[in-house]
Image (cartoon, rainbow, N blue to C red):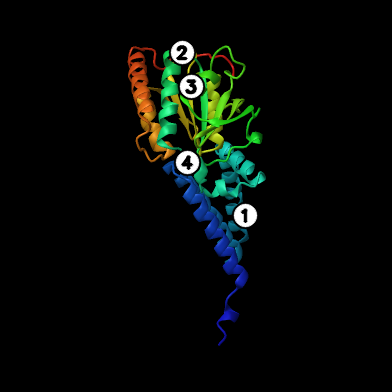
Amino acid sequence: MNLWGLIDLRLLLDVFFAVSLGVLLFSRVNEPRTLWLLRGYLFLVSLAWFVQRFERLPLTSKLIDALVLACSLSLAILWQGELRRLMELLGTGRLVVLLGNAQKEFKATASTVAQLTEAAGRLSQSRRGALVVVDVGSDLRPEDFLYPGIPIDAQLSSELLLNLFASDTPLHDGAVLVKGNRIVSAGVILPLSRQGISRYGTRHLAALGITERFDRCICVVVSEETGTLSLANQGRLERPITSSRLLDLLKDLLGASMGSPSGKTVLSSKSSLKASDGQLTQRTSVNTPTKETPQ
């Protein structure tokens, strides 16, 4: 008896690729409610495939197909942002980002976290609007932005960030793109999010927009009117936050091995944290919508 003659190679390949795709989808979903929806949808698809292949039930097959189609349209509306990001990644050939393998050269260090926190705290004290995009593995490219900005390619420092966001400079209205320990470009115009249009200003909508499309980047936002610090990650905005809270979030999200930076950086960062925290404690209008200067 020939065992290989009883095995349908095409069926095995079909099941293998379907299971691989399912594992990939489940590995990329972290939210429980989204995971439940995905499980239910894949169950319907599997049921439709089983009925069509092994049973001759035309009426049941039609009903299941109609149900799968209705669920597909509903999920397309519900997950339009995620599907758009998926098509963008496939169109640009960034399968590494799609599979979730962060690139090592984008890993931040303790000095990067300290410099970012110090600059954000000082900008908050002086109420100067700022938007910093930190790429930790999405491999952001010029085509991902409405305008790619002006190339900088300089070592990240708090002094340079303060100069880029000075109100009398031509680049202060755009975002600064940071990869690893370097500032890549400034004056970047980001796509805006459609959520919270009536609540947030342009900088916050831009931070939400880029983090909705790319889950391996974060945005630090400083409000120009109130000096409030915010952090956007995966399409969610945490605000207002203190400088010490920002430092903790950056440590967690950037995955930096927090060694001791230089003594000057630590000292200036601590003084900035204390001053900024004292300023934020005095604010009472926490959730007041703000209208900010466009990027």
Kind of residue at disc 3: Glu
User: Mark 2 sits on what residue?
Assistant: 127
Kind of residue at disc 2: Arg
Taking the spot 59% from the left edge, 17% from the top edge, the residue there is 294
Q: Position of residue 188 (x, y in %)?
A: 61, 26
Kind of residue at disc 1: Lys
Taking the spot 42% from the left edge, 32% from the top edge, the residue there is 113
User: Mark 1 sits on what residue?
Assistant: 62
**First in sequence: mark 3 vs mark 2:** 2
Foreground disc of the pair 1, 3: 3
**First in sequence: mark 1 vs mark 4:** 1
User: Mark 3 sits on what residue?
Assistant: 159
Foreground disc of the pair 1, 4: 4
**First in sequence: mark 1 vs mark 3:** 1
The answer to the question of whether label 1 and label 2 lie on touching residues, with beta carbons closer than 8 A, is no
Q: Position of residue 123 (x, y in %)?
A: 45, 17
